[in-house]
Image (spheres, rainbow, N blue to C red):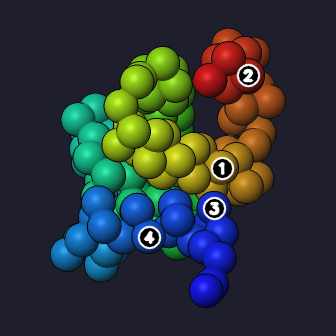
Amino acid sequence: MSRITVKNKWSSLKRHLSAGDEGFWLSSEASPEYCVRLLRFPTLQTYYGIHNKLKSSSNGWMCEFLESNGMEVLLGALERLSSAKLFVDAVMLLECTSCIKTVMNSKTGLDFMVGNRDFTRRLGRG
């Protein structure tokens, strides 16, 4: 009998919850403003698509995303999802966190966070 790891369980749950939408990608022409609008009413698929968009974005696109309040919206979602009681929200929290991590892995995103003490505090609380 094989033992299922926690990571495999989360991956399986994520696949199940986003069944049929794992290939959700935003158009390469999707503007930062459009992505921020999508994040205001997020779904698991939205987070998945925006995470992929953030990973492949240029520094200029990332800068526009941040100037369009992208990090503000992500941190607001992080705060809401952190206090949620539903299991599905835990999966959305993981995807939201992945988006924040991707932003912070870029020099533009890290510089933005370091330059804004309020965002740094909010990230610590989330």
Q: CA distance from mark 1 to mark 2?
A: 13 Å
76 or 61, nearer to the observer: 76
Residue type, label 3: Val
- Furthest residue toward bottom: 1
Residue type, label 4: Ser
Residue type, label 2: Gly
Q: Residue at x 30, y 78 (%)?
A: 23
Q: CA distance from mark 2 to mark 3?
A: 25 Å
Q: Tag 2, which secondary structure? A: helix
Whole-percent x, y for residue 26 in the image: 29, 67
Residue assigned mark 1: 101
Q: Is the N terminus in the top left, top right, bottom left or bottom right quadrant?
A: bottom right
Whole-percent x, y for residue 58 in the image: 56, 66
Q: Residue at x 44, y 28 (%)?
A: 81
Query: Can residue 123 be seen by looking at this rendering?
Result: yes
User: How crowded is the residue under tag 1: few (<14 C-alpha within 10 Å), some, or many (20+)?
Assistant: some
| Labels 2, 4: front one | 4
Residue assigned mark 3: 6
Residue assigned mark 4: 12
**N-term mark: 1 or 3:** 3
**N-term mark: 1 or 2:** 1
Q: CA distance from mark 1 to mark 3?
A: 21 Å
Q: How many marks?
A: 4
Whole-percent x, y for residue 102 in the image: 62, 55
Q: Is residue 31 left or right of residue 10?
A: left
Q: Are marks 1 and 2 in contact (CB under 8 Å)?
A: no
Q: Is residue 95 left or right of residue 20?
A: right
Q: Residue at x 68, y 17 (%)?
A: 125
Residue type, label 1: Lys
| Labels 1, 4: front one | 4
Quarter of image, res 85 = top left
